[in-house]
Image (cartoon, grey):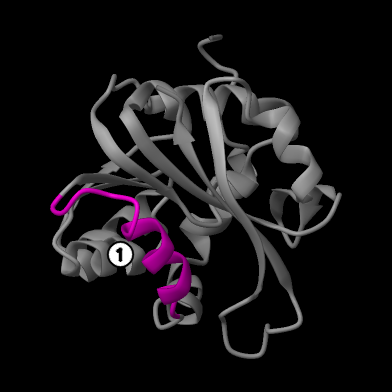
Amino acid sequence: MGMDSANMDSSTINYYEENAGSFVAETVGASMSDALGRFAALLPEGGKILDWGCGSGRDSKALADMGFDVVATDASEAMCESARAVAGVEVRCEDFMGLIEREAFNGIWACASLIHLKRSQLPEAFARANVALKQGGVLYASFKLGDFEGYRSGRWFTDLQSGDLSVLLTGDWELLDCWESADVREGRGDEKWLNFLARKAC
């Protein structure tokens, strides 16, 4: 894996540095209970979870409250500060490329975070996640539904459709579930998301 190939776009990170307050206010109260429930049901009680691109820390807190051992990462220092305050868990400020653990986690939660990588970077990101998961570990990820790739409101976005997953998730993964959902943020219900759960193939 190339040493720079999973780096996030710098203008996207700057967006979160400059808009942390408004982003947290918009997202911290949104409920991801359906996806969290599906994810948690596949994990051992008290398992170790990586919240990969944790944003406000909303989901880190929810997972910690379920009894999981949560470690969170985000590429934005401002987001990391929020997550520490909201969730009270260990938060590392690092890019997706910073994930170098091997067989360390029972689950990886990547809610609306990998969307900020370029499509060409996603296979490496998924490969890093696979290496970091224990045997039988589970990845949850969500992307805006569509085929757009590029800048939108100052951030890089890669949208996906369900057919993309068979290309991006290679033989190291077993796709367990894939479903569409409406945006859970207030006033955004017309925006659709693609969610999936994949298990590290034994």
Name the element at disc 1. helix
Residue at 86% from the left image edge and 49% from the top image edge = 147
For this orientation, the residue located farthest to the bottom is 187
Q: Please name whichever residue, 93 or 50, is drawn nearer the observer in this view of the structure.
A: 50
Q: Is residue 99 above or below residue 2?
A: below
From the viewer's perspective, tell me whether residue 132 is left or right of residue 88: right
Query: Of residues 176 and 11, which is closer to you in this image?
Result: 176
Q: Tell which residue pokes out farthest to the right in this image.
A: 147
Q: Quadrant of residue 133?
A: top left
Judged left or right of residue 72, residue 22 is right
Kind of residue indicated by mark 1: Ser
Q: Is residue 180 magenta?
A: no
Query: Is residue 36 positioned above or below 17 on the image?
Result: below
Which residue corresponds to the image point at 33% horizontal and 43% vertical from the top-left?
A: 107
| Of 191 and 39, the residue lying toward us | 39
Q: Residue at x 38, y 26 (%)?
A: 98
Residue named by callout 1:
82
Q: Which residues are magenta?
A: 31-46
Q: Position of residue 122 (x, y in %)?
A: 64, 31
Q: The C terminus is located in which quarter?
A: top left
Image location of residue 86, percent across then percent down: 24, 70
Q: Name the residue at 34% across, 36% down.
A: 137
Image quadrant of residue 20? bottom left
Left or right for 163, reference 87 = right
Q: Residues within 10 Å of mark 1 (few under 14, many from 20)?
A: many
Number of numbered discs on residues: 1
Q: Please say if 70 is above or below 4.
A: below
Residue 181 drawn at (x, y percent)? 65, 71
